[in-house]
Image (cartoon, rainbow, N blue to C red):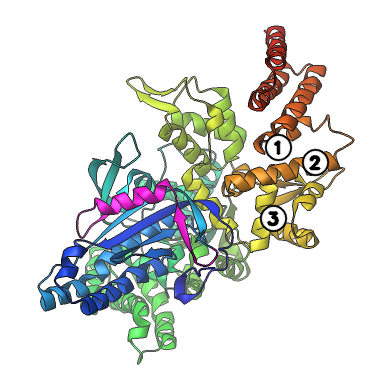
Amino acid sequence: MADVLRPGGSRSSRTGRSERRILSLMFCDVANSTALAENIDPEEWVEIMNEAFEKMTAPIIRYEGTIGKFTGDGMMAFFGAPVSHEDDSERAVRAGLEILEGISELQESVRRDYGQEFNLRIGINTGLAVVGEVGSAAVSEYTAMGDAVNVAARMEQTAASGTLQISADTKKIVESAFNLEPLGGIEVKGKSESVDVFRVLSPRLRSERPKGTGAPLIGRDEELKQLIRLAESTKSGSGQIVSIIGEAGLGKSRLLSELREEWIKTEPELTWEFSQGIPYDIGRPYSLFQNLARGMFGVELTDSPGTIHSKVDGALRSMGGTDEAVSLCSTAVEKIIAAKVLHEAPNHSAEAIKTDLFQVVIPAFVQATKNRPTIVIFDDLQWSDDASMELIIHMLDIIVDTQMMIVLAYRPDPQSPAQQVRKVAQSKFAGRYTEFVIEPLNIEHTNQLITELLHIQDIPIEARELVLRKAEGNPYFVEEVVRWFVDQGMVQRTANGLEWNETSDINEATIPDSLQSLLMARMDRLSDDAKDTLQLASVIGRAFYHSILGKISDSTLELDMQLTTLESQEMIQTEVNQSELRYMFKHELARDAAYSSILLRRRRTLHLRVAEAMESVFENSLEDNAHRLGYHFSVANDHERAMKYFELATDVAAGVNAKTEAQNHLRNAIIAATNLNVPEEKIAMLNNRLTELVASNA
């Protein structure tokens, strides 16, 4: 089995089973390589290409992508397998930009030594692909295949020399993070319509406002009022520490954004500083403070000490800062930036920089915020590096003597580094520490959010119910599902505004790509066995019995251990008041993500195993489970047993006067009968019964 290149030269073990994945796929090659190779000796050309490959692979490894394959003059890589991250598309684009930037020295040497122009071109596309081992029993490689791969290749083939080009599907996900130039449409083989493409120009500074569709803040009024009151209290010298804790998508960043607007609206002269944890920067010392310096003073990681002093001096003096404040802050920022290049400064040890920082940061903040109420935000603190976490804990003492509120926003993962600062704040600053735990929206507020997002009076009840069921009160999930309606044409923009497309089939709704990546990122943190158990359970349904899962599991002896792991990771929960031990996925979208990652052929096999296990376990109550048995046998393409159980389910539903359900079961029985090529008389009989049921329900 082929190894998979991972960051730091490590290898991933999760490559044995193919999966369906949302990937961001990158193709990178040398422009005009044939002409270049003709003018350079083959041995020297190999040396040039090896150096080029080094420059190509380094950013991919940094952003935790996977090298799919090398070609003679380029390579294919992908982000999202074997381990997903919720920001894989952004990682891919950032890696692409760094590749183009990092190739400059090689370009200059080829130009100097051979008089030739050496350039790369890069293309990226995001979409569904199958990833796994491809090849023969003797030789194989871990790679990705599918239409999304072909589109990515086309992005690269049509990119101008020295540029990075992305598809519209990637653009939808990353547009808030990069400056893009629309280039129109290009033809892609096998597609009836052209594909819109965009050139990536540069990264944007991280926005303090989360990507959204413009709905007002809903269901968080009380939390916002309390935050405003705490901010106001800092003006009298009562410094505060605040934790905002909640799962991804519940609105932590949005709440901070609203606080900022209120803060600036009432006190435009007051100070607001913001830093955000970035998942791929966890290994960079003091990354949160480097990001904070960029926002406060416009400092870049590549700035010289002189440039840093100039920027800090100008910013502080414009705010009325003293000479002492200028000196302290310049020193602090310079040392924070220096932490990025510790490996280049062997005479200045990491411990020495740490000591200097700890001695200078607090006085610098005190001076910078003297007589100036300030809010300092550390968002996404679950992605803090260890050095930043130590420094944050150290600077909490500032609130005792300054008009400062330090706000920490993070997810409730008990293993998160953010828990360290939480414990210190709770124990050492109990009188000045406030904690907000953000919960999902209730049904009323979720309905209100749906209405605000769509502004459609006649949205079908089935569509509204689907959003309520899938999003389960998570505002980001609501926005993404609603956005999916628009992207798929279920909601159309007309002269009168947004309108529901009457030809849309709500049953075709699938999980949006953005949510698939976020949820898969959580799954990929599980062990192989726990993840396999989760996928098996997803085939049974959102709720599943231990007895059924045990019959289809390959490792029944370890099943209870895996289920305990899944419960501790809050992927599933035990159902109470059940005669049979039953579990349920905590989120329907999590079940959808696990299920959608399974190959179609394997799904059919598993559905058959589930159906036969149910026949065995529930042999004395087949009528009560007939509709489930019909569904599983149908997906398994066992049409004979599917027809049998759907007919039985029809009888059961009709017997309790559940006419709509009876009609649906009978329609499924007719589909199964049609697939079986049963005699026309049988299908006619089923159709006649359906006509009678419809008439009785009129």
Observer able to see residue 638: yes
Residue 102 in percent (x, y) is at 26, 70
Which residue is located at x 75 percent, y 60 percent? 555
Which residue is located at x 71 percent, y 13 percent? 681
Q: Which residue is mark 3?
A: 533
Residue 605 in percent (x, y) is at 67, 46
Asked whether 421 or 670 is in front, the reply is: 670
Which residue is located at x 56 percent, y 55 percent? 18
Q: Is residue 377 magenta?
A: no
Please state, as top left, top right, bottom left or bottom right, where the N terminus lies in the image: bottom right
Q: Which residue is mark 2?
A: 614
Q: Identify residue type, mark 2.
A: Met
Secondary element under disc 2, as helix, strand or loop, is helix
Instruction: Give how far apart the Cα atoms at labels 3 and 1 are.
Output: 18 Å
Task: Check disc 3: other Cα within 10 Å, few if <14, some if 14-19, many if 20+.
Answer: many
Q: Identify residue type, mark 3.
A: Thr
The reply to whether the C-beta atoms of the residues labelled 3 and 1 are less than 8 Å apart is no
Secondary element under disc 1, as helix, strand or loop, is helix
Residue 582 in percent (x, y) is at 79, 46
- Nearer the observer, disc 2 or disc 3? 2
* Extent of the magenta region: 137-164
Instruction: Give how far apart the Cα atoms at labels 1 and 2 are.
Output: 10 Å
As drawn, is 469 to the left or to the right of 409? right
The reply to whether the C-beta atoms of the residues labelled 1 and 2 are less than 8 Å apart is yes
Chain-order first, disc 3 or disc 1: 3
Task: Spot the residue most to the right.
Answer: 620
Asked whether 48 or 277 is in front, the reply is: 48
Secondary element under disc 3, as helix, strand or loop, is helix
Q: Which residue is mark 1?
A: 632
Chain-order first, disc 2 or disc 3: 3
